[in-house]
Amino acid sequence: MKLKRVLLFVFAVGICAASCKSQYAVLLESNDTDAKYAAAFDYFNKGKYSKSAALFESLSLLVGGTAREDSVLYYWGLSNYSMGDYYTAETNFSKFVATYPYSPLEESAEFLRVDCLYKATLRYELDQTPTYTAMQAISTYLLNNPDSPNADICRHMLEDLGERLENGSMAGESGGHFCDPLISFMMVYNAIKGNYTGIEGNFVDVPFPYLYVSSPDDYKAYEQYFVDQLPYTDEELVAMSELSLDDLKATAAGISIEDAAQRAGK
């Protein structure tokens, strides 16, 4: 008798769970295109973008070849865009632009695509491949839509990304670590020569400065004195081989663009 009651309870819970399934869950699993289409726009207009995105994605499998196909793809992308999923949104808008070049929504989709690419770019100190991709897409958009109301926004995007690349190239090249091997070599060389005594088994702290580059002119000077040529002449290197450890530390700490330019007679 007790077992029978348990089974009846479990059965009742199962019925309740099935009947209590949300309207959204029912729609998501449904093949009722009209109801799902209306609900997707209702959720979108209410700002419930994750639900509208899921419904539009589900609809994309049901409306192929119909008059609703383009709007479903567009608003699927717009739902993802609105909730910050720029990667999926860009994929949606790219497909839209390629599939519906004559749609009245085409220019909007093309702009939203480049905006997704712009928003997905990385900080200047990270990989800038997405930045180049975005700049190419934005330039193409401006060529195709020179009179677009979004043209000024796109030009601002290009200016911002250009500055980011400039800052990134300087940041990536401006560290002074390339001097470390040179000074380290001189230290080892001098130690082998027997110039240093009393440091066996000890760590030696040598200060290496970063060569900060804050302008295009600074970068050109950095490239001239530290990339295209060594910051020391052959004679200076020979002289460094005779320096004491303290003097070599001072040389390492004093390296700078201004110092290299002055010693080069510029």
Image (tube, helix red, strand yellow):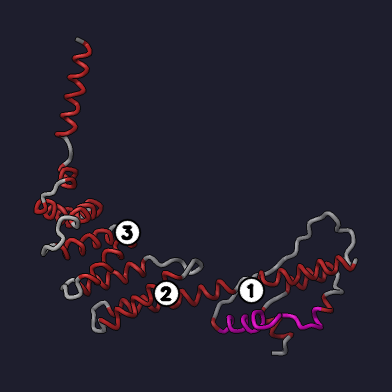
Can you say whether 201 is above or below 100 in the image?
above
Inspect the magenta stretch and tell me whether residue 117 lies in it.
no
- Secondary structure of the residue carrying tag 2 is helix
Query: What residue lies at 33% left-to-right and 62% top-to-bottom?
Result: 86
Q: Count neighbours of disc 3 (C-alpha within 10 A) and say few if under 14, some if 14 to 19, many if 20 or more.
A: some
> Residue 148 location, x and y as percent?
23, 80
| Residue extending farthest bottom | 266
Q: Amino acid at mark 2?
A: Tyr
Front residue of this view, candidates 123 and 54: 54
Front residue of this view, candidates 61 and 238: 61
Look at the image and give the residue range highlighted in magenta.
217-237
Quadrant of the rendered structure where residue 253 is? bottom right
Residue under label 1, please give it: 211
Q: Amino acid at mark 3?
A: Asp
Cα–Cα span, label 1 and label 2: 27 Å
Query: What residue lies at 50% left-to-right and 74% top-to-bottom?
Result: 167
Cα–Cα span, label 1 and label 3: 39 Å
Q: Is residue 3 left or right of residue 205?
A: left
Residue under label 2, please give it: 132
Q: Count neighbours of disc 1 (C-alpha within 10 A) and say few if under 14, some if 14 to 19, many if 20 or more.
A: many
Cα–Cα span, label 2 and label 3: 20 Å
Disc 1 versus disc 3: nearer the observer:
3
Dominant SS in magenta: helix
Query: What residue lies at 58% left-to-right and 74% top-to-bottom?
Result: 173
Q: Amino acid at mark 1?
A: Leu
Closer to the chain start, of discs 2 and 3, is 3
